[in-house]
Amino acid sequence: MEKEKVSSGNIIDFKVLKRIMQFVKPYKGRFYFVIVLTFLLGILTPIRPMLIQYTLDTHVQYGNYWAMVNIMLIILGLLVVQSAVQYAHTYISGRIAQFIIRDIRIQLYEHLIKLRLRFFDKTPIGRLVTRTISDVETLSDVFSEGLAAMASDLLQIIFILAFMFWIDWKLTLVSLSTIPLMLLATYVFKEKIKVAFNDVRNAVSNLNSFVQEHITGMNIVQIFGSEKREFEKFKEINKEHRNAHLRSVLYYSVYFPIAEIIAAMGTGLLVWYSAKGIINMEATGITIGKLVSFIMFIQLFFRPIRMIADRYNTLQMGIVGSSRIINLLDDQTDIMPNGTVTPSDIKGQVKFDHVWFAYNDADYVLKDISLDIKPGETIALVGATGAGKSSIINLLNRFYEINRGSIQVDGMDIKEFDTASLRKNIGVVLQDVFLFSDTIRYNITLGNKEVTDKMILHAADLVGARKFIDRLPGGLDYNVMERGATISVGQRQLLSFIRAMVYDPKILVLDEATSSVDSETEEMIQNAISKMMTNRTSIAIAHRLSTIQKADKIIVLDKGEIKESGSHDELLASDGFYAQLHKMQYKEIA
């Protein structure tokens, strides 16, 4: 499994920030209200120390008890108002964040389901899960703890500085003499934690990819006795994840005590300078009230500075996650262009006209393929593994885009069809049946409410699956669990037949549809297939030649090229590729 490595880059990525802010537009009223609350917090924070200074110097010093009580009541009211504003600021910004990540996650998933299969062939599923879940979640912190909180901290610092310089500029300079040390410590911490957080995001992505891939393929791991080796790989990836987190813990555990010491040094210098002036009765204008207020100012000033480093890195993580999400949303290379034609009725004529196709640019798996299938005709594709049989089916359904040539249905290029309309008219039964962890009904309809139970049961009768469904507890409401774990392989195959037939498709594709069933079930399915193929264009991929002898035409593929075509008898008489395959297969049976 390829490990993902991404670089965090610069924090101020204005392109990413601009794109993020586009998601705020539906909630701009609430967003502007948060900005107003941010300004209020910045203004309210430094008022309390000034009132305390006024109380000490004006009322406490002269024993004016009731005036002091009135000021204390004002301070209490101020605290209530500030708490209410802080609550509204935190709640509304957090609420906006949740709505935004909901919208982004919907947009991201909508984008993913439009991508071609080629994209999923080359991208680990766990990485996409990380994009859709974890990376989107970091955006919540950008709005609730990043931008809004950081703006509030900056405004508080600005207003506190303004009040401090207004009251006494000399005391302000003494109080802030340790600021260079704090800025240096904050910068070093910011750089270190940025790298650590980026390592954490990479480790999470790699961990998700590994776990998803190996849980999905657990049967292979156990069949080949590879549990111990895979467990060692997991421990190594998990170790990288742990170490990345431990580095961030180390930087936090070093930075915050240092920040506290620097803040305490500033307070110490302030007390020393002020006390010296008061004791020596120097004409400095320093009073007890002013000293107390400046001690409070220092605490209020250094607290947001300490927090800004943490906010900075929250914003950094959000920018990293946002950048990866935006890159995925902006990647249009794997989105299939959709046509506009939505035919009400398809007759079923299929034509491949000199089609060339490669999964990788130059490595062609189909070379100059030309087929002309008449409506209602049944053709079979045979050939060795890797000959290109499944690729023909994938191209007909537009899961991939051809390199050269054209594919037509009823004389019209399939690129002109609305993809959903095209696929609705093509019923596909694959060899590997995928079932979701849900009911029989859902796995047949896939949530399409237009498909009624009557339509489901009619299709079930057609393929001979009605009896087994009726025997299940709850019938159509029976939950097959993940990947159909609670039903047999043959029953899964029968459900895939119902799923294909419930829409009454004009074109039927069978990819070795009976390979996973027992002889009794196979006989039942073969009878069903005969009924299904009636009045439908049918394309069957078969490894067992006995299942396709009645096909109107058999196409023999080898290394992406058509080597022979004709009926079963004609191909046997020509004594070519098909005849050799036939002899080899029946020799094996004998």
Image (tube, grey):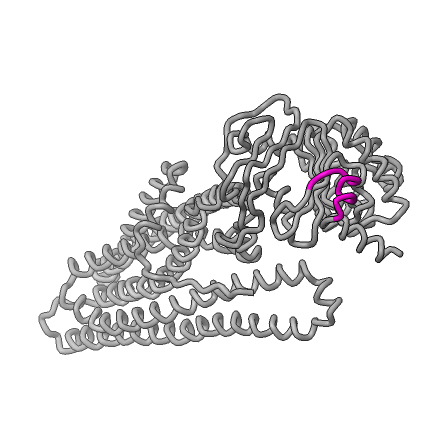
* Most distant residue in the left direction: 283
Q: Residue at x 58, y 47 (%)?
A: 366
* Most distant residue in the top direction: 344
How many marks the image carries: the answer is 0
Determine whether, in the image, residue 132 is placed left or right of residue 18: right
- Please say whether residue 570 is one of the residues in the magenta stretch: yes
Location of residue 368 with respect to 181 vertically, above or below: above
119 or 321: nearer the viewer? 119
Q: Residue at x 89, y 56 (%)?
A: 590
**Percent position of residue 349, x then y:** 64, 28
Q: Residue at x 19, y 56 (%)?
A: 162
Specify the quadrant that holds the N terminus: bottom right
103 or 141: nearer the viewer? 103
- Please say whether residue 45 is one of the residues in the magenta stretch: no
Determine whether, in the image, residue 62 is placed left or right of residue 397: left
Determine whether, in the image, residue 132 is placed left or right of residue 274: right
**Percent position of residue 327, x then y:** 41, 51
**Residue 440 seen from this side:** no
**Percent position of residue 368, x then y:** 55, 43
**Residue 153 seen from this side:** yes
The rendered magenta stretch, by its main secondary structure, is classed as helix
Location of residue 454 with respect to 73 vertically, above or below: above
Give residue 410's quadrant in the image: top right
Q: Which residues are magenta?
A: 565-575
Location of residue 319 with respect to 108 vertically, above or below: below
22 or 469: nearer the viewer? 469
**Percent position of residue 116, x then y:** 53, 45
491 or 403: nearer the viewer? 403
